[in-house]
Amino acid sequence: MSLAAEIAARFAAPACDRWSVRVVSRTTESLSVTRGIPDPVGLSEDCGAMVTVESAAGVGYAATSDVSREGLARAGRDALAWAKRTGGRLVAPPPRDKSLGGNPVRHDDGASAPDWNAVSRADKLARIAALAAQAKRNDRIADWGAGVSFTDEESVIATSAGDHIRQRRGIVVPWLNASASHPGETQTRTFGRGGVIRQGGFEALDDLGFWNAGTRVGEEALELLAAPNCPEGEMDLLLAADQMYIQIHESIGHPLELDRILGDERNYAGTSFVTLDMFGSYRYGSQLLNVTFDPTVSGEAASYAFDDEGTPAEKQFLIKDGLLVRPLGGATSQARANTPGVANARACSWNRPPIDRMANLNIEPGASPLDDLIARVENGIFMETNCSWSIDDSRNKFQFGCERGRLIKNGKLGAVVKNPNYRGISATFWRNLKGLGDPSTVSVLGSPYCGKGEPNQMVRVGHASPPGLFGAVQVFGGG
């Protein structure tokens, strides 16, 4: 029996209507090299349990890192006390059992996490050091480094209905950067700048092309240092997949979170320009835009079989042929809003209750090779790799900056430009989508650091997307 399963089996519930216990056990190792010097190895371990109790028409939570029998029993009593205090005060009744067909759910994918230790720590550090050294092209590279973190996470949900859901996953997050400088200016090029994350182990780095990226990153940093500033004006904009992911995240993902639409986030992260009456009729984008919530994609950052409330996960369209059809709302928010949602109730760890979060939020590919998208542009710019973003508190007006741009003239890629930026309005930007890359152009990316909730919850999300071509976008430089 695994550690998390053993802890869940220790729980003795108080007398109540329904209960669940969610145990999370997590270990993380971080390895990095900065300017040729290995950094201290980062190691962390974390384990605890969240008990949820329903009683007298109320719901209570209690979390504990004391996973002894007495510690778990104490958490159960505390949760029961809170449930009694909230009786008759809930904004919506708690969601019902998720058991399929009335039968308890039994699920175990606990053997699926990769063996991170199949490669020794010394060998990992040696490879990371060699990669970072590739980025040091000459003395104008003033700062350079590379690193990888790996998290082995196991969760178990057990309920009074007899459900037992065990899920285990490995998460790998690589980084690589090179900064080129001369007096008065620095330009930085990275490997995705925090947008590269996969489920898997050390082998996932081969699939990502990580070990071959050092020379390119260093040379492109030097190239940016010598490049002219991005021009200003309205033009076509072709976004690489490593910029599309953050555009999806900020101007589709967060606006469609149902608890935000219901007003829960306004004190902290803002509201949304989306309202409940828009679903089923609002044109969010052009007919090319198809956005799916899909926690079933193998290897994507937030793939899972069940969310943290125990709801079975399946692929759902949120935007279909440009029309808004479904929000990002878990079972609790669905009950509040009386509208269908998805299995996206997620918690960052054992010490937080689940809230509505993005998981894998993807744009379905179109039919155009990248060369065809470029050939369609008479006057425009190709932008890669987000380096800055700003968006208003209703997730509508936005501004993004990228690391690298290339001008497009008469259907051909031209000169490299630095400090490329663009701005727009979510409610119209996606309607100007006029081209999407085909399946061969899709990149599976995401973020390890999506923050939301009070108290804050930082979770990983996945975004798979092809490059996207947009018309009539305001572009400007940073000079």
Image (cartoon, rainbow, N blue to C red):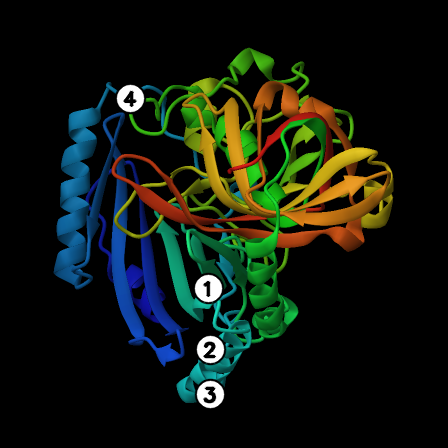
Q: Residue at left 17%, top 29%?
A: 84
Marks 2 and 3 sit apart, C-alpha to C-alpha, by 12 Å
Q: Is residue 347 left or right of residue 326?
A: left
The quadrant of the image that shows the N terminus is bottom left
Marks 1 and 2 sit apart, C-alpha to C-alpha, by 13 Å
Q: In this view, does 403 lie to the left or right of 383?
A: left
Secondary element type, mark 1? strand
Q: Earlier in the sequence, mark 1 or mark 4?
A: 4
**Residue behind mark 1:** 168
Total numbered badges shown on the rendered structure? 4
Q: Do the residues labelled 2 and 3 touch (CB within 8 Å)?
A: no
**Residue behind mark 2:** 116
**Amino acid type of the residue that numbered disc 4 sits on in the rendered structure:** Leu
Q: Nearer the viewer, mark 3 or mark 4?
A: 3
Marks 3 and 4 sit apart, C-alpha to C-alpha, by 54 Å
Q: Earlier in the sequence, mark 1 or mark 3?
A: 3
Disc number for residue 123: 3
Label 3, residues with CA under 10 Å away: few <14, some 14-19, many ≥20: few
Q: Which of marks 1 and 3 is in front?
A: 3
